[in-house]
C-alpha cells in the first residue's frame, strides 16, 4: 500500500546509469501505443517491476505531476522520472529514449506513408489495435483507483471526471486545475483549523 | 533555414501552451499547420492516422512527420525536440522548487486529488476510444459486429487489472486476437 502521507519516495536501488535509463525508456517508447496515458502500465512493468528504480507509489505520483506540466504527457513523465533518478542528465537520457524509437519508425515510414495509407491492411492494423488500446487504458484507470484503496470518494471523483469529460467534451485542463485548487484550498483550511481549536 | 526557425517556434509554442497532454494539443497543431500552409486538412488527418498506428506519443509523432514533410530530416529533429523543450525547462524549474515543497502537506493533498482525477481522465480517453471503435463497427455491420472488439477490450482490461502479464503482451495479444477474430 502507499504511504499515507503521499510523499514521493525516491528510487529504491542505486541510481541508474544514464545508458540504462535511456535503454529502459527506449524499450517503453518502442511499444507505446495509445498515447501518454498508456505509458503508465508499461513504465510500471519496466521501471518499477524490472529495474526497481522507483516504487509503484512514486511512479503514480510522477504521473500525477506530469499532468500539471505543459506538454506531452509521455515526455513529461520521462523527464520527471529521469530528473528524479539522475538530475538533468537523467531527464535528457530518458526523454531521448522515449522519443527515439517512434522517431526512427516515423522517418522510416515517412517516405512510403502515402503508399502505406492506401493499403487496406494498414486500416486493419489500426482497427485491430484500437479495442486493445481501449482495454489497456480502461484497465489502467481501474488499477489506479484500486491501488489507492476502494474508497467511495475516489471512485466518485474518477467517475465524475470521466463523465464530465465525455458528456461536456471538457478540456482535461479544468479537472487538473480544479484538483490543484481544491488541494491548495484544503491545505489552507486545514492549516487554519488547528489554530482555531487551540484558541480559548 | 528560416523554415527551421519557424518550425522550432511553432512547436515550442504548442508545447508550452498545452496542459493536459497530446489530445489537447491536436487542435492547436492543426491550426498552426493550416496557418503556415504546412499541411492541408486531408494531410493532417492522414498524419494522425499514421501516428496512431505507430508507437510513441501521438503529438510527438505528428511533430516528427510534419517536420519531415516541411524541411526533411533536420525539420523532423527540430520539430520533435522543440515540442519537448518547454516541458524540459518546466521540469527543471519544477525540480528546483520540488526539494522545498516535497514534504509540504499541501503537496500530498494536491497529489491525493490528482490521482483519481487522472484515473478519470484515462477512463474518459478509453471510453471515447470505445465509442469511436464501436460506432465504426456498428456502421459496418450492426450489433453482431460489436461482439469481437468488446471482447478484446474487456479481456485486455481484465489482464491489465490483474497485473500479472506484461501490458505489452496484453496489448499485442489483444490486437492479434482482434485481427484473428475479424477474419472468422
Image: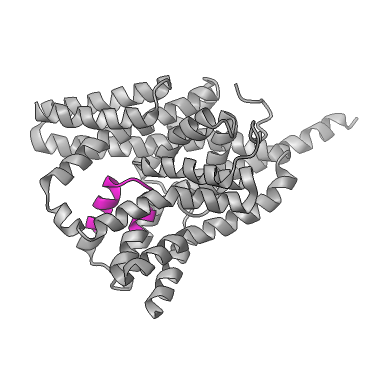
Look at the image and tell me whether residue B20 can be seen.
no
* Image position, residue B112 (x, y; %): 60, 33
The reply to whether residue A173 is visible in this rendering is yes
**Magenta span contains residue B51:** yes
Q: Compared to A123, does A55 lie above or below?
A: above
Residue A195 in the image: state x and y as whole percent. Answer: 84, 35
Residue A169 in percent (x, y) is at 36, 46
Secondary structure mostly taken by the magenta-highlighted segment of the chain? helix
Question: From which residue to which does the magenta span run?
Answer: B45-62
Placement of A178 over or under A12, stated as above or below:
below
Residue located 52% across and 24% down the image: A147
Q: Residue furthest bottom?
A: B2
- The reply, left or right, for residue B78 in relation to residue B33 is right
A11 relative to A59 in the view: left or right: right
Residue B61 vs A155, above or below: the answer is below
Q: Nearer the viewer, residue A27 or B179?
A: A27
At 42% from the left and 30% from the top, the residue drawn is: A140
Location of residue A103 (image quadrant): bottom left
The quarter of the picture where the C terminus of chain B appears is top left
Which residue: 49% across, 28% down? A144
Q: Is residue A25 magenta?
A: no
Tell me where residue B66 sits by quadrant: bottom left
Please state, as top left, top right, bottom left or bottom right, where the N terminus of chain B lies in the image: bottom left
Amino acid at each position: 500500500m502507499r504511504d499515507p502521507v503521499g510523499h514521493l519516495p525516491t528510487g529504491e536501488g542505486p541510481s541508474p546509469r544514464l545508458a540504462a535509463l535511456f535503454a529502459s525508456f527506449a524499450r517503453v517508447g518502442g511499444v507505446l501505443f495509445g498515447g501518454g496515458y498508456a505509458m503508465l502500465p508499461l513504465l510500471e512493468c519496466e521501471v518499477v517491476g524490472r529495474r526497481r528504480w522507483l516504487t509503484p507509489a512514486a511512479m503514480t505520483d510522477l504521473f500525477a505531476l506530469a499532468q500539471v506540466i505543459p506538454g506531452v504527457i509521455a515526455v513529461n513523465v520521462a523527464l520527471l522520472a529521469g530528473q528524479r533518478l539522475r538530475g538533468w542528465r537523467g531527464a535528457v537520457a530518458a526523454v531521448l529514449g522515449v522519443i527515439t524509437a517512434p522517431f526512427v519508425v516515423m522517418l522510416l515510414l515517412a517516405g512510403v506513408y502515402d503508399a502505406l495509407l492506401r493499403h487496406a491492411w494498414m486500416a486493419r492494423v489500426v482497427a485491430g489495435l484500437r479495442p486493445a488500446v481501449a482495454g489497456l487504458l480502461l484497465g489502467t484507470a481501474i488499477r489506479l483507483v484500486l491501488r489507492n484503496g476502494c474508497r467511495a470518494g475516489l471512485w466518485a471523483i474518477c467517475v465524475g471526471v470521466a463523465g464530465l469529460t465525455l458528456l461536456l467534451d471538457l478540456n482535461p485542463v479544468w479537472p487538473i486545475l480544479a484538483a490543484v485548487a481544491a488541494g491548495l484550498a484544503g491545505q489552507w483550511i486545514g492549516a487554519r483549523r488547528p489554530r482555531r481549536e487551540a484558541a480559548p | 533555414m528560416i523554415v527551421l526557425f519557424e518550425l522550432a517556434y511553432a512547436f515550442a509554442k504548442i508545447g508550452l501552451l498545452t496542459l493536459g497532454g497530446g489530445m489537447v494539443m491536436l487542435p492547436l497543431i492543426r491550426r498552426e499547420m493550416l496557418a503556415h500552409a504546412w499541411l492541408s486538412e486531408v494531410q493532417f488527418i492522414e498524419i494522425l492516422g499514421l501516428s496512431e498506428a505507430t508507437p510513441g506519443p501521438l503529438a510527438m509523432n505528428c511533430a516528427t512527420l510534419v517536420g519531415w514533410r516541411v524541411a526533411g530530416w533536420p525539420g523532423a529533429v527540430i520539430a520533435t525536440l522543440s515540442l519537448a523543450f518547454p516541458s524540459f525547462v518546466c521540469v527543471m524549474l519544477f525540480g528546483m522548487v520540488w526539494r522545498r515543497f516535497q514534504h509540504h502537506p499541501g503537496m500530498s493533498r494536491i497529489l491525493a486529488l490528482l490521482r483519481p482525477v487522472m484515473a478519470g481522465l484515462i477512463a474518459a480517453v478509453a471510453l471515447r476510444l470505445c465509442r469511436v471503435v464501436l460506432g465504426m463497427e456498428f456502421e459496418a455491420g450492426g450489433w453482431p459486429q460489436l461482439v469481437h472488439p468488446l471482447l478484446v477490450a474487456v479481456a485486455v482490461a481484465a489482464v491489465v487489472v490483474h497485473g500479472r502479464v506484461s501490458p505489452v503482451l496484453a496489448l499485442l495479444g489483444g490486437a492479434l486476437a482482434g485481427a484473428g477474430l475479424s477474419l472468422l
